């Protein structure tokens, strides 16, 4: 079975550019989570969806961050404009009925 | 805000040694999960503990949930190089989503 799929795996961009991260959750899962991981702050929840509806976006750091889930099989996390302090590994995870979360391999973002 | 403190932050040991890592909080959690994360990958769930005082074993790994459901420990017996990774604990409290600790980075040297 395919797990959570994220793309791209690595992204290097310059400050001020728009960045879009993509996630395909496991089929049949009704929860989707976006996390950010850094050495300093660990794994932080940014936003999560239930049945494609955003439930809690209190972890989104600034208005520069936005996330959408247009259907059950696709979600995006967009940063516009990007800043060097946004450099981190971004994970998408999905679960069924808020049970065990399955994480994707992550997108390593570097903003120069 | 519920916080989980993990200790030690880093641990480097020789193959065959035993070790214990800790996950502590001032908050009560309805359940607590342990994950292992290897370089370049996402965290993978190892175990979930739900009942205060519960002990679960997974081969050489022993997980314990504190009686008050505020803390947990992970004990590894006879560590192997394959145990190397970042160990994360995560607490679930009612309607709130998982809260993760910053992790213990374990290195087992052959």
Image (cartoon, rainbow, N blue to C red):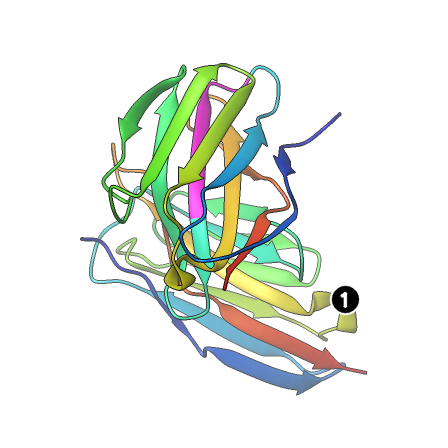
Q: Residues within 10 Å of mark 1 (few under 14, many from 20)?
A: few
Horizontal relation, residue B18 to residue A51: left or right: right
| Residue B64 visible in this rendered orientation of the protein | no
Q: Which residue shows up at 72% across the image and 75% down it?
A: B78
Count of marks placed on residues:
1
Instruction: Tell me residue B5's x, y (percent).
Output: 33, 68
| Residue B1 visible in this rendered orientation of the protein | yes
Q: Which residue shows up at 54% across the image and 53% down it?
A: B35
* Nearest the eye: B102 or B80: B102
Residue positioned most to the right: B110
Instruction: Tell me residue A59's x, y (percent).
Output: 28, 45
Classify residue A40 by image quadrant. Answer: bottom left
- Where is A79 relative to B71, above or below? above
Classify residue B57 by image quadrant. Answer: bottom right
Q: Which residue shows up at 27% across the image and 41% down it?
A: B93
Horizontal relation, residue B74 to residue B90: left or right: right
Q: Is residue B26 magenta?
A: no
Judging by the rendered image, the residue that carries numbered circle 1 is B82
* Nearest the eye: A18 or B55: A18
- Where is B63 relative to A50, above or below? below
* Nearest the eye: A18 or A78: A18
- Where is A64 relative to A50, above or below? below
**Circle 1 — which element?**
helix
Range of residues picked out in magenta: A29-35
Q: Chain of mark 1?
A: B
Q: Is residue A33 magenta?
A: yes
- Where is A28 relative to B25, above or below? above
| Quadrant, the N terminus of chain A | top right
Task: Characterize the magenta stretch by its predominant secondary structure.
Answer: strand
Instruction: Tell me residue A87's x, y (percent).
Output: 46, 60
Q: Which residue shows up at 55% across the image and 73% down it?
A: B105
């Amino acid at each position: 079975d395919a797990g959570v799929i994220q793309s791209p795996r690595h992204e290097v961009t310059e400050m001020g550019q728009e960045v879009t991260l993509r996630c395909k959750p496991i089929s049949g899962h009704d929860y989707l989570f976006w996390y950010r991981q850094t050495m300093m702050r660990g794994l932080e929840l940014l936003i999560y969806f239930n049945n494609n509806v955003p439930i809690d976006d209190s972890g989104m750091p600034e208005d520069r961050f936005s996330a959408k889930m247009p259907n059950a099989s696709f979600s995006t996390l967009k940063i516009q404009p990007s800043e060097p302090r946004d450099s981190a590994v971004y994970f998408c995870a999905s679960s069924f009925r808020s049970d065990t979360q399955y994480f994707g391999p992550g997108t390593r973002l570097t903003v120069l | 805000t519920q916080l989980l403190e993990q200790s030690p932050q880093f641990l480097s040991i020789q193959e065959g040694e035993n070790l214990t890592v800790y996950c502590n909080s001032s908050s009560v959690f309805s359940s607590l999960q342990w994950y292992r994360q290897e370089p370049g990958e996402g965290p993978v769930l190892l175990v979930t503990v739900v009942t205060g005082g519960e002990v679960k074993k997974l081969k050489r790994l022993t997980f314990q949930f504190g009686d008050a459901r505020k803390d947990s420990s992970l004990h590894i017996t006879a560590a192997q190089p394959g145990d190397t990774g970042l160990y994360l604990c995560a607490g679930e409290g009612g309607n709130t989503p998982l809260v993760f600790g910053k992790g213990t980075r374990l290195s087992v040297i052959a």
